């Protein structure tokens, strides 16, 4: 876990070797490029299911991208790196909205096939110091999403007949 979540700018890389003690390599969190992996999932679904009897297309997949929360106050992280990570995630969000169409929760049940669920956090989040106030802020943000989660569950249930099995 330390190697996969060594956020660039907040932690030094984790250096790991294989089981034989050879091939020592540095590992960092990929958040600077793939902070939102939804585009990787999209591309993989289209590639893996293109030869099936019911191939995946832009119109028959639905992607729900779930983030861990947004804030403009990342403590313990270089501001330039924080901005780079945030903008990379936002670009992926915009590209999927262009490809699949954005979905709102109150609109037509046949609108776009992409929705990003990423709560805005009211306070600064520390990348290096886990304290009780941070967990309380995350729990409050999660509870505020209950209505959206229920609306998304309803949309998925209502549209299960038109979505590709790989997207559910």
Image: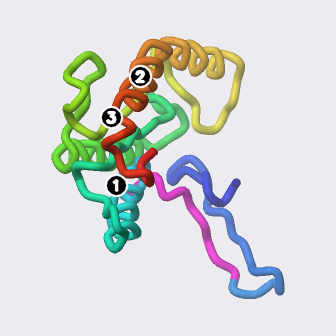
Which residue, given by chain and number where applicable, does mark 3 sit on? 115
Disc 3/disc 2 C-alpha distance (Å)? 14 Å
Count residues near mark 2 (Cα–Cα under 10 Å), then give few for <14, some for 14-19, many for 20+.
Answer: some
Is 77 or 151 nearer to us in this picture? Answer: 151
Which residue is drawn at the image coordinates 40% and 19% (left, top)?
151
N-terminal label among 3 and 2: 3
Where does the image place residue 32, in percent across and percent down from the top left?
41, 54
Left or right side of 21 for 136: left
CB contact under 8 Å: marks 3 and 2: no
Which residue is drawn at the image coordinates 65% and 21% (left, top)?
135
Which residue is drawn at the image coordinates 46% and 15% (left, top)?
122
Location of residue 56 (image quadrant): bottom left
Location of residue 73 (image quadrant): top left
Count residues near mark 1 (Cα–Cα under 10 Å), then give few for <14, some for 14-19, many for 20+.
Answer: some
Where does the image place residue 93, in percent across and percent down from the top left?
29, 43
Where does the image place residue 80, in percent across and percent down from the top left?
36, 45
Disc 2/disc 1 C-alpha distance (Å)? 24 Å
Which residue, given by chain and number where applicable, does mark 1 sit on? 39
Is 119 or 107 nearer to us in this picture? Answer: 107
In this view, 35 is above or below 129: below
Which residue, given by chain and number where applicable, does mark 2 sit on? 154
Count residues near mark 3 (Cα–Cα under 10 Å), then give few for <14, some for 14-19, many for 20+.
Answer: many
In this view, 52 is above or below 144: below
Secondary element at image label 1? helix
Where does the image place residue 5, in percent across and percent down from the top left?
61, 52
In this view, 78 is above or below 5: above
Check residue 119 for magenta coloring.
no
Region rendered in magenta: 24-33
């Amino acid at each position: 876990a330390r190697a996969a979540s060594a956020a660039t700018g907040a932690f030094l890389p984790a250096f790991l070797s294989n089981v034989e003690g050879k091939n020592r390599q540095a590992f960092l969190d990929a958040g600077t490029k793939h902070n939102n992996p939804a585009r990787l999932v999209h591309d993989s679904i289209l590639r893996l299911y293109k030869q099936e009897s019911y191939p995946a297309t832009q119109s028959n997949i639905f992607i729900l991208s779930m983030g861990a929360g947004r804030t403009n106050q990342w403590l313990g992280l270089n501001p330039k790196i924080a901005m780079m990570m945030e903008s990379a995630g936002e670009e992926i969000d915009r590209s999927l909205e262009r490809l699949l169409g954005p979905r709102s929760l109150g609109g037509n049940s046949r609108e776009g096939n992409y929705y990003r669920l990423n709560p805005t956090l009211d306070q600064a989040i520390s990348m290096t110091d886990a304290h009780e106030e941070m967990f309380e802020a995350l729990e409050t943000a999660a509870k505020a999403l209950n209505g959206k989660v229920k609306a998304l569950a309803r949309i998925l249930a209502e549209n299960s007949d038109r979505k590709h099995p790989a997207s559910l």
